[in-house]
Image (cartoon, grey):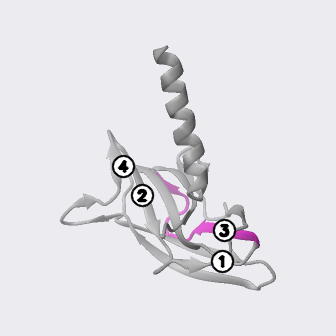
Amino acid sequence: MQKGLILLVCTALFLGCDSIGVFEKTNFFADHHWKSNQQLTYRFTITDTTARYQIYTIIRHEDAYRYNNIWVRFTTQAPGDTVKSQLLNLRLADNRKGWLGTGIDDVFDHRIRITRSPQKLRKGDYIFTLQQVMREDPIAAILNAGIRIEKVQP
C-alpha cells in the first residue's frame, strides 16, 4: 500500500513538472574537460505563444574548478530568424560567498539566467548552442553544461 502511494505521488510530481513548462537538456563531459571546439546544440519546440519564458544556462563543476566565472558563447536561432550570438561572462563564485550555486560534497550546480526578463517566444523550433571560450583549453573540472527554459507562472 505504501509503495503504491509513493509511486502515485512521484508520478504526479513528474507529470506536474511537464505542465509548468520546464525544458532542460545538458551534456555530460565524461573526462570532466570541456574543450572549446565542443559546441553543444539543443533543440526545443515552443507551442505555447501566450506564455513568457526565462532562459538559463546550466553548469555543473567540481570544487577543483579554478575560476570564479566561465565565458561562453550563447547562440540562438528562433523559427524563421537569423542566428544571434552573444558572449556571456557567467559568474560562478565571488570572494565573499564562495561558490554561488548549490553544492553537495565537491560538486556544484549553477542555474544562471540569461534573459533579463521573461520573454515571449514564437511557435516553432528553437536551436540554442553553448560553447566555452575560456583562454584555458580545455577547461578542467566541468561535469555538465546545458540549457533550461522555464515557463513563467502568471
Type of amino acid under label 2: His
Q: Distance between the residues labelled 2 and 3?
A: 18 Å
Q: 25 or 136, which lies in front?
A: 25
Q: Are marks 3 and 1 in contact (CB under 8 Å)?
A: no
Q: Distance between the residues labelled 1 and 2?
A: 24 Å
Q: Nearer the viewer, residue 39 or 25?
A: 25
Q: Tell me the element at label 3.
A: strand
Q: Where is residue 1 in the image (x, y as percent from the top left)?
A: 49, 14
Q: Is residue 97 magenta?
A: no
Front-lying residue, 37 or 87: 87
From mark 3 to mark 1, how far is it between C-alphas? 17 Å
| 71 relative to 41 in the view: left or right | left
Taking the view exactly as shown, the residue that stands out farthest to the top is 1
| Crowding at mark 4 (Cα within 10 Å: few <14, some 14-19, many 20+) | few
What residue is shown at x 52% (from left), y 33% (from top)?
10
Q: Name the residue under label 2.
A: 110
The residue labelled by disc 4 is: 64
Q: Which of marks 2 and 3 is nearer the N terminus?
A: 2
